[in-house]
Image: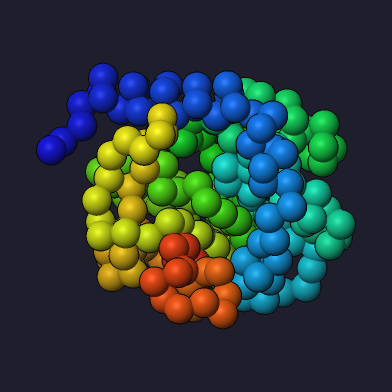
């Protein structure tokens, strides 16, 4: 079923409202999540010498911005939730942009890498091609995109006040390849568990062309 402009506006507004209303509890609940495996996966594929210009796409309250700063890089945050933008600026001291994912305005060729951790699944499937193209275009030539999403059977809909789209590996590959990316690696998380206990699909991609 094709989503119209009203549907998309509702998806954005209600999902953002959920995070706005739960910003403090979200920060507390995710503060100690270990995503070092994901950060390392992004950084090891970026070519050239550091420090790197990194877009933390869907940066939330700023946990990973602080990590990138501590590692000596130059991160910029982006989030659609006003409270998260405020929190991330205070927590990290970084520049943080407030933008709706469905209405992105990104500078061309700006970033060496994009860290999209637990965020792109909020984009409705029909809108993902344009969002992925926008991310590709804001990367420098041969720049790298990391993404991690809860995996599924290519279904989407509402889940506890938020909209989500849940892709399997083949579906996700098709979307990224069509948007102008080449796959570098993928893995499932958490590490060391049977596949049925690994709900997260992580993947790393290079801007093609």
Could you tell me residue 198's position as x and y percent?
A: 46, 69
Residue plotted at (84% across, 62% down): 71
Picture coordinates of residue 98, whole percent (x, y): 60, 29
| Left or right side of 153 for 61 | right
* Left or right of residue 30: residue 142: left
Residue pictured at 55% horizontal, 29% vertical: 19
Q: Look at the picture and state if 99 lies above or below 123.
A: above
The quadrant holding residue 183 is: bottom left
- Figure check: 141 above or below 158: below
Please tell me which residue lies in front, 31 or 103: 31
Say which quadrant the C terminus sits in.
bottom left
Q: From this viewpoint, is residue 206 visible?
A: no
Q: Residue at x 25, y 56 (%)?
A: 154
Q: Nearer the viewer, residue 181 or 123?
A: 123
| Residue plotted at (56% across, 69% down) | 190
Q: Is residue 120 left or right of residue 178?
A: right
């Amino acid at each position: 079923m094709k989503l119209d402009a009203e549907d998309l506006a509702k998806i954005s507004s209600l999902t953002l409202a959920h995070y706005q209303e739960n910003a403090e509890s979200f920060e507390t609940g995710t503060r100690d999540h270990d995503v070092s495996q994901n950060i390392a996966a992004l950084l090891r594929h970026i070519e050239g010498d550091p420090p790197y210009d990194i877009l933390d796409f869907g940066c939330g309250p700023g946990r990973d911005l602080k990590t990138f700063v501590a590692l000596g890089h130059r991160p910029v945050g982006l989030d659609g939730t006003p409270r998260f933008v405020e929190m991330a600026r205070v927590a990290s001291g970084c520049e943080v942009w407030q933008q709706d994912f469905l209405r992105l305005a990104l500078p061309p060729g700006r970033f060496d890498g994009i860290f999209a951790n637990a965020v792109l699944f909020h984009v409705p499937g029909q809108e993902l091609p344009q969002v992925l193209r926008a991310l590709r275009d804001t990367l420098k030539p041969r720049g790298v995109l990391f993404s991690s999403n809860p995996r599924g059977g290519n279904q989407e809909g509402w889940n506890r006040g938020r909209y989500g789209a849940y892709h399997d590996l083949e579906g996700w590959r098709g979307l990224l390849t069509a948007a102008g990316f080449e796959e570098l690696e993928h893995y499932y998380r958490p590490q060391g568990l049977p596949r049925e206990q690994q709900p997260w699909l992580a993947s790393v991609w290079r801007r093609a062309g």
